[in-house]
Amino acid sequence: MTDPIAPQILIVDDARDIREPLGQYLRKQGFRTRLAANAAEAREILAEAGIHMVVLDIMMPGEDGLSLCRWLVAHDGPPVLLLTAMADETDRIVGLELGADDYLVKPFNPRELLARVRAILRRAPPEVAAPPSGRRVFAGWLHDPDALSLAHEDGRRVDLTSAENRLLGIFLDQPRHVMSRATLLDLTAGREAKAYDRAIDNQISRLRRKIEDDPKKPQILVTEWGGGYRLVAEVAPEGPEHGA
């Protein structure tokens, strides 16, 4: 069984006979994998899953790999390993100029690809979210991340653990966005943490007990079935009326 906190690799290749065997091979080596047949599918996966690296074919119908690579680099996406045809020397050079981390020429030995994947991941910085900063208001609450606390407009005050504080900060950064468990794990713990999907569920439950009027029927931090969790409240910086 694949470790649920193992690095997750997105393989983007329109050739099914390449992406599926490659996905199986990397899973046997201990990685988690996601597969996409084109750039559009890749963008959807990148939007909802915690991806640590992209193995990307250059020659694809529709949007090609170079275009997707350019977009990933521009948006501070995960590192990219390009797959190129033997004759595409120009594309390889352009890909590296765009910011790809490495390339591999087809046909390739899976063991060489594995070595390059591991080398790229070793160079990648840990994906641990920075501590939240800035006091913000939402659903009647004032979040003070430096004090690890919440204050309600009705006078209630609750303390947060470091994990709860970080998790709440992530939701406040992206209100109304669905956050998958995989994404939350990556942002709160990083790939080195000894975490698992239920750890996020447990943290969500504890956070709900502190911010919801009825934790069993949450109205602020809601569950998106099959998708993850979403903060449905409006979020704003602390205004003068909330100051001490």
Image (tube, helix red, strand yellow):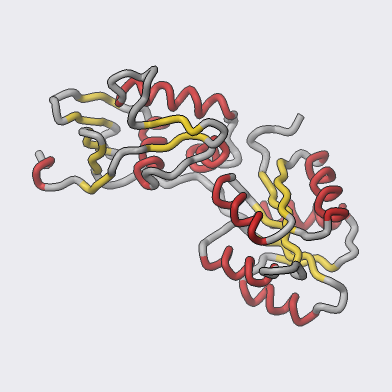
Q: Quadrant of the N terminus?
A: top right
Residue 65: percent from left, percent from top: 69, 68
Q: Is residue 99 above or below residue 11?
A: below
**Number of callouts in the render?**
0
Q: Is residue 45 visible?
A: yes
On screen, 44 above or below 6? Answer: below
Q: Is residue 240 left or right of residue 210?
A: left
Which quadrant of the structure image shows residue 158?
Answer: top left
Task: Tell me the quarter of the picture where residue 186 sits.
Answer: top right
Towards the viewer: 210 or 45:
45
- Residue 166 seen anywhere in this rendered image of the structure: no
From the viewer's perspective, tell me whether residue 27 is left or right of residue 235.
right
Q: Position of residue 175 (x, y in %)?
A: 37, 44
Residue 180: percent from left, percent from top: 53, 38
Q: Which residue is more in the foreground, 180 or 145? A: 180
| Residue sticking out furthest to the bottom | 90
* Viewer-side residue, 101 vs 224: 224
Residue drawn where x is 48% and y is 22% of the image: 202
Rendered residue at 23%/48% (across/down): 237
Residue found 9% across the figure and 39% down from its top: 244
Residue 191 image point, x, y percent: 60, 41
When the figure is inspected, residue 37 is found, relative to residue 209, above or below; the finding is below
Residue drawn 57% across the image and 35% down it:
193
